[in-house]
């Protein structure tokens, strides 16, 4: 495979994904951007689910306020099953993105980068610094 900028008569992943028109190529580019955004969504969903599990376990345990030790909790079988499904979905989508990138099509690779930027912008927009229950946004210095 060689680096290319082909738009028409290009194949991605399989023979059934054969680009025969400019519109089909544009749709493929949009789909690639969407796929990478989906990956970032899945990463965020997995993080949020872990936080949900942790907060629910803390609410059930109700540790004393003066305790300074961290509470560690092993997820239930159902919780771990959901975590494993989220991880497998991330892994499958990421693998598919790598397969798209190794076509060495410059436009597709740019679409992967655009999707990563948009996905990170939307799904990584979280509080930074401070404690989990605090106001966040510590100062640099």
Image: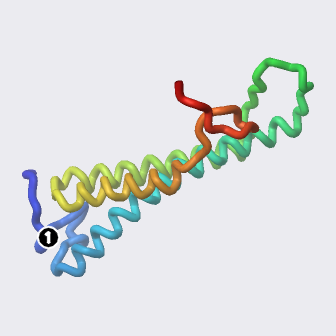
User: Which residue sits at x=23%, y=60%?
Assistant: 108
- Residue 69: x, y in percent? 79, 18
Does 80 sit above or below residue 86? above
Label 1: few (<14), some (14–19) or many (≥20) C-alpha neighbours in 10 Å? some
- Residue 26: x, y in percent? 25, 74
Pick the front one: 30 or 9: 30
User: Which residue sits at x=43%, y=58%?
Assistant: 37
Horizontal side of residue 31 vs 38, given as left or right: left
**Which color scheme does this rendered protein use?**
rainbow
User: Which residue sits at x=17%, y=66%?
Assistant: 11
Does 9 sit above or below residue 44? below
- Residue 100: x, y in percent? 26, 56
Does 64 sit above or below residue 79? above
Give the quadrant of residue 7: bottom left
Horizontal side of residue 126 vs 99, given as left or right: right
Q: Which residue is mark 1?
A: 7
User: Which residue sits at x=72%, y=45%?
Assistant: 52
Pick the front one: 72 or 63: 63
Give the quadrant of residue 23: bottom left
Query: In the structure shown, which secondary structural element does the residue marked by tag 1 occupy?
Result: loop
- Residue 137: x, y in percent? 62, 38
Q: How many marks?
A: 1
Horizontal side of residue 35 vs 137, given as left or right: left
Give the quadrant of residue 110: bottom left
């Amino acid at each position: 495979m060689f680096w290319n900028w082909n738009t028409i008569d290009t194949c991605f992943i399989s023979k059934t994904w054969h680009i025969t028109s400019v519109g089909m190529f544009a749709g493929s580019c949009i789909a690639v951007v969407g796929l990478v955004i989906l990956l970032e969504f899945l990463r965020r969903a997995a993080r949020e689910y872990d936080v949900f599990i942790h907060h629910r376990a803390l609410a059930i345990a109700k540790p004393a306020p003066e305790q300074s030790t961290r509470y560690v909790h092993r997820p239930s079988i159902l919780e771990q099953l959901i975590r494993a499904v989220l991880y497998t979905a991330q892994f499958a989508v990421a693998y598919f993105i790598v397969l798209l990138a190794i076509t060495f099509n410059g436009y597709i690779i740019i679409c992967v980068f655009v999707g990563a930027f948009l996905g990170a912008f939307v799904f990584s927009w979280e509080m930074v610094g401070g404690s989990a229950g605090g106001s966040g946004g510590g100062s640099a210095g």
